[in-house]
Amino acid sequence: MLSYTDKYDLAGQKKSLYNLENSIVRQFKEPRIHFAIVCASKSCPKLASRAYTAENLNDMLDAAAKGFINDRAKNRIDEKSKTIYLPKIFEWYENDFNDAGGALKFIARYLPEKDAQEVLKGNYSLKYLDYDWTLNGEIWKEPFVRLKNEQVLISSLLRVSHRAHRGNRKRHHEGKIIQEAVPLSAQDIKPLLIGAAVPDVKLTTVQGAELNLKDALAGQPAILIFYRGGWCPYCNLQLGQIQRIDSSLLAMGYRIFAISPDRPAMLTESLEKHDLTYTLLSDHSMEAAKAFGIAFRVDDATLAKYRQYGINLESSSGETHHLLPAPSVFIISKDGKLGFTYVSPDYKIRIDPDVLLEAAKAVLKMAPDNSAKGKP
């Protein structure tokens, strides 16, 4: 599986998939390419069954555009309300379609003649449908991919979720969290996918004050690091690595929040011990971890083993829930949506700081003010 941001040898040059799409393909000012570049999600165009060649390129791009625009499962025309509902692709790449006269004029080229005439009269308003990022086929049986010599569960910057998170998971409806069962193993977590909105959850600061996560973001890009606690040596190593790239992330405009089940007093110890300058927050109730889909319950045998090592989860969190988060990193774009996620069920494996920096740069490039509005 290719990473969207890693660079590969191509015709003697180092290029990433992001470079190919945005620095080369899109420079041709050809909006039809958005129906040829697919991500395997339900709202994306279908993958062509044959290769694009110089000889068939124009015909195949037309066929891809026509097929997508006339697929009523992905867009629709409401004659009663005089509203056309289009997928987010037309919003994310608005500038590309403006070069072709605008989205409505563009789709009219591929609609049946009667519908096209109505659209061109200018009597229709335009609205965008929510994007369905779930896979359009079977769940991939191997949820682990190789990246920088690490095995991780990753939902990358590709316009794809490597795994369709189905079954018993925490859902969100109109900003409200619907509680569902917490998994009994880190292997069974179901993290939020790229494109999902940041959950409306509350955390606690080092000073003991309540902090609303959405209010804290306030339209700024952010890095959220979920870690197990100051008692975990792998977490402490990661916190130190984040500190080393802290200035680079801040220079890009990111805010950094490291979140753990530790109660505020324990956070103070971590700040002083590791000389951290970014913000630590307490999720002692584990409501945030549950909302992001990364919480799991620690079994009794593991709890007993921890106690032998002098680790007391109840003392650390001040709670008796016996929950931990799978180590995770979420990059939040300016629109308050997930632009990148990295989740590892194996607590020993964390994201490489260089990979995090590259992912942070890529999310900014694909932010709304760069003509790819919110698209991961």
Image: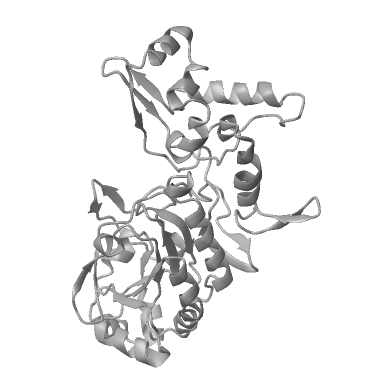
- In the image, residue 98 above or below residue 211: above
The image quarter containing residue 258 is: bottom left
Side (left or right) of 276 relative to 361:
left
- In the image, residue 63 above or below residue 162: above
Q: Residue 297's x, y, as percent?
A: 34, 69
Taking the spot 48% from the left edge, 83% from the top edge, the residue there is 240
Side (left or right) of 365 relative to 256:
right
Colouring: one colour
Q: Residue 345's x, y, as percent?
A: 48, 67
Farthest residue, direction top: 114
The image quarter containing residue 306 is: bottom left
- In the image, residue 142 above or below residue 117: below
Taking the spot 50% from the left edge, 76% from the top edge, the residue there is 245
Q: Is residue 44 visible?
A: no
Side (left or right) of 322 relative to 227:
left
Front residue of 152/180: it is: 152
Taking the spot 28% from the left edge, 72% from the top edge, the residue there is 283
Farthest residue, direction right: 12
Q: Is residue 65 visible?
A: yes
- In the image, residue 79 above or below residue 330: above
Q: Residue 68's x, y, as percent?
A: 52, 26
Q: How many numbered marks have been drawn onto this rendered protein structure? A: 0
Q: Residue 102's x, y, as percent?
A: 46, 27
